[in-house]
Image (spheres, grey):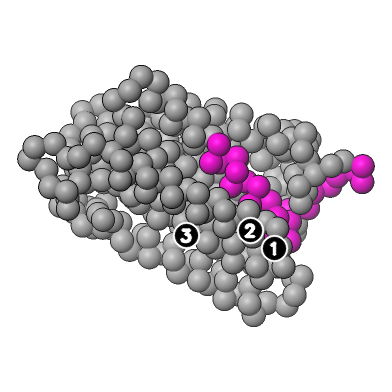
Amino acid sequence: MHTGQSEGWSHPLPARLHQPAFGLLLAAIMANVAWTLTATPAAPLPSLVEGAPWACGLLSLAVGLARRLPLQNIAFALTGLLAFSGALECLAAQTGIPFGLRQADAGAGSILGMPWFSPFLWAALILSARGIARLMLKPFRQTGFYGLWVLGVAVLLVTLVWLTIVPVATTGHWWDSKLPPDVRHWHGLPWLSLPAIPVAALLQLAFVTPWLLNKKPVRQPLDVHPLAVWSCLLAWLMARQALAGLHGPQLFTAGLLGTSLGATLWGLKTAKAPTAGTSPTNPTERD
């Protein structure tokens, strides 16, 4: 598995920084879980502790992409994702559209009513879900409508993972869902607002995809880094759900993690064998 070595990547410096960036994500997750274990029950964690896994996850994904993409592509992609998702979350905090009225608690580092890390959360989900979708569908890269299938699978993954995030956000005081008592909801997310999540994910993926395509593709090591980030974030959410006694969401998260891992491994296993000049122990791919 190529995670941090510079061999074979277009840009050696990000390849050398890749493992330290992924280490920051692991450290942020461990610090978050440790703080949760020692914190006063029902008391919100510091906003920096809550947001660090999402910010570090996005940093790790950005460094991973920078191994094979120009820096300006990464800058435009991140700027667009953060601006679009931030605008949506601010709109939801002020008007309840499109995700239902949810406002950050005072201790959540509120920016215009939303937690400061909400845009980082969205961007990390979008980039990791797209990377996993590409790995799942690797056997079908040469078929028609491959790009549309990648978009569809990525949108589905983002939508499902939001169902695992909302229970943690509610119990962790990331925001307060101000819903009328007669509104049916999933831990503060109105069921009628659920379709807004795939629509928002699709719009962001449609924007970011052109910036993530290498206009001069060359053979580079197979990148399973998005799967690693995705797995770490889901495992962290599952741990937070267990600590909060949210056993239903915990089982759902475990099922999502197992299914995504299984589907990705299936995609990698059934993909075409390496072409002449490549080694099975050093798989490569074209972007």
Side (left or right) of 69 relative to 9: right
Quarter of the C terminus within the rendering:
top left
Whichever of labels 1 and 3 marks the residue nearer the N terminus, that label is: 3
Magenta segment? 156-182
Q: Give amino acid for label 1.
A: His
Q: Nearer the viewer, residue 19 or 132?
A: 132
Q: Which mark is residue 165?
A: none
Q: Residues within 10 Å of mark 2 (few under 14, many from 20)?
A: some
Q: Nearer the viewer, residue 59 or 228?
A: 228
Residue holding disc 1? 247
Q: Residues within 10 Å of mark 3 (few under 14, many from 20)?
A: some
SS assignment at label 3: helix
Residue drawn at x 33%, y 63% is 20
Whichever of labels 2 and 3 marks the residue nearer the N terminus, that label is: 3
Residue holding disc 3? 232
State how far apart marks 1 and 3 are (Cα). Answer: 19 Å
- At which x and y percent is residue 208? 44, 31
Residue drawn at x 48%, y 26% is 206
Residue holding disc 2? 251
- In magenta stretch: residue 65: no
State how far apart marks 1 and 2 are (Cα). Answer: 6 Å
SS assignment at label 2: helix
Asked if labels 2 and 1 touch by Cβ distance under 8 angstroms, the answer is yes
- At which x and y percent is residue 143? 33, 23
Quarter of the N terminus within the rendering:
bottom left
Q: Give amino acid for label 2.
A: Leu
Query: In this picture, is 38 found above or below 170?
Result: below
Q: Give amino acid for label 3.
A: Cys
Q: Residues within 10 Å of mark 1 (few under 14, many from 20)?
A: few
